Every structure is written in C-alpha cells, then in structure tokens.
Image (spheres, helix red, strand yellow):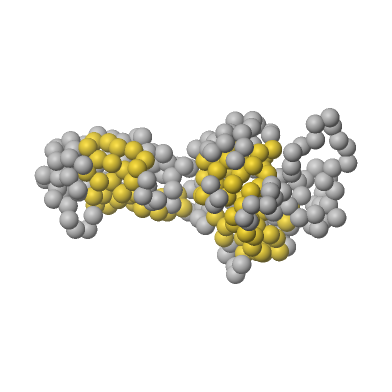
Amino acid sequence: MATYQTTYGVSPAKGLPGQIANEEKCNKVSRTVESAAGIAFGQPAFRGAGDHGVVLGGTFAATGAGSAAASGNVGTGTITASPAITAGAKQGRYRIVLIGTSATAPYLVYDPDGLVVGDGLVATANTSIPGITTFTISNAGTMTAGDTYYIDVTYTANAVFLGLAVLNPAVPPVSSGVADRYPQYFTGAFMTMGQMYVTAGDTVVDGGDVYWDPADGRYTSTTTHVRIPGAKFDTSGGDGDIVEVSLKLR
C-alpha cells in the first residue's frame, strides 16, 4: 500500500491531490493508462489511442480555420483563413454575427457553447477574444446585419478530456520523491463528475475557470494553460495550496 505521509506538522493538509473531496454526486470510469510515465493522482487524463486508453495531457496545441457562412450572407467579405489559436480557446465552432449594416459594421462573437465572448468591427483586427490571437473580417459588398462568419477550433493535443485521476491507496508507490500515480498499463479510476482536491499553481478563486499547467501539474487561473472543460474552482487558495475543483457540478 502506498504511504501517504509519515510525519505531521502543526497544520496538516486539508486533503491530498486526487482525493474525492465530498459526497456530492460523483462519477468515475476505469481506463488503461497508456503514458510511459503514468498519470499522477489528481492529474487530467485525455482519450488515448487504444480501446479504453487514456494519456496524460501535454502542452496545448490547436488550429483555427476561418470561413464565411456558405449561404445567406449579403456582403462578400472574408475572415482570416487561419487565425492562431492559444490556450483558453474552446474546441468547436465560434460564430461571428454582424449586428449592423455598414462598411465597419459591429459584430458579436459567440463561443462553441453559444455564449457571447466579445465583439468587434468589420475591417478592424480583433485581438480581444480569449484564445484566438487575432482575426479580421474584411469589408466587401454590402456588409449587412445577420452576415455570419465562423472560426473552427480543433485541438491537436489534449483533444478529448476524459477525467481526473482518482487517488487510490492500493496502487504501489513508484519511488521515493515521485508523486504516487497509476503506472503505464495499470487500470486507473478517473473522475468524470464530482469534487476533487488538487494543488493550486497560482492564486485561484471560488467560481473561477480551471486551467492546468503541464509544466508542474498544478491547477491555475492562467488562461495560457490547458483549460479543463466543465471545471470550476470551488475554494480559493494560493500557489501550492490544496484546493477543491468541481467537475460538471457548478
């Protein structure tokens, strides 16, 4: 059995990474670890190559493809063909809809979940949408309210988030000084819904979106890191603190 801790300070930790935090509705699935380094408790897992396989995430990577609606547009403007995508962008189709009729018509930007995430003007570069570095809608024809454009974001790393690795005392420790984990080819438990303790990597606040830093395995509020879809911080804390994240419950 893995040894969690052999000495205790004045203020013991409130929890351990990967520990289920409470008895709220929780769902876990069993999956086989494909990554050679294994997957440490509390770390995110993504769909692997084999049946029921999972891999540890890596550095964010994605592509973007801009296009005009295939039909219905009055104006003949175009959108940047390949906008650069950074962490913070959601996977799926962003929709840009003109809300005025003019050469510099205003527009709204909807994310793949249908939420308004920004606005802009035709013929002016837009750098305000989280995760989309810059794009421009050109002015051509009569740019008309209702004209629609798209940016399709496709993840090329961390493509399908599956869940968070659940702490399991039955898993043998890897070695001294190495975080306990599910080793390669081991069948691990991964939380797809519920409350879990994780380690914060910077100042996080209750209700904030959750991002994961692959460099140190900590969870942050920094949008340049890998976004964990459906997750919210459920407690506040600073770098190195144990905090709760809520997955698909908030």
**Occupied quadrant, residue 193:** bottom right
Q: Residue 123 or 109: which is nearer the viewer?
A: 109
> On the rendered image, what quadrant is the N terminus found in?
bottom right
Residue 223 showing in the rendered view = yes
Residue lying at 57% horizontally and 33% vertically, measured from the top left: 205
**Residue 95 coordinates in the image, percent (x, y):** 31, 49
Q: Number of marks in the image? A: 0
Is 7 on the left or on the right of 217, as rendered?
Answer: right
**Residue 171 coordinates in the image, percent (x, y):** 79, 57
Image: 238 above or below 144: above
Residue lying at 80% horizontally and 35% vertically, measured from the top left: 12
**Residue 91 coordinates in the image, percent (x, y):** 43, 52
Image: 123 above or below 155: above
Q: Residue furthest front?
A: 24
Is 116 on the left or on the right of 195, as rendered?
Answer: left
Is 22 on the left or on the right of 8, as rendered?
Answer: left
Residue lying at 30% horizontally and 37% vertically, measured from the top left: 119
**Residue 179 coordinates in the image, percent (x, y):** 75, 46
Q: Residue furthest right?
A: 6
Q: Residue 173 or 25: which is nearer the viewer?
A: 25
**Occupied quadrant, residue 45:** bottom right
Image: 220 above or below 189: above
Residue lying at 54% horizontally and 52% vertically, measured from the top left: 248
**Occupied quadrant, residue 46:** bottom right
Residue 214 showing in the rendered view = no
Q: Residue furthest bottom?
A: 51
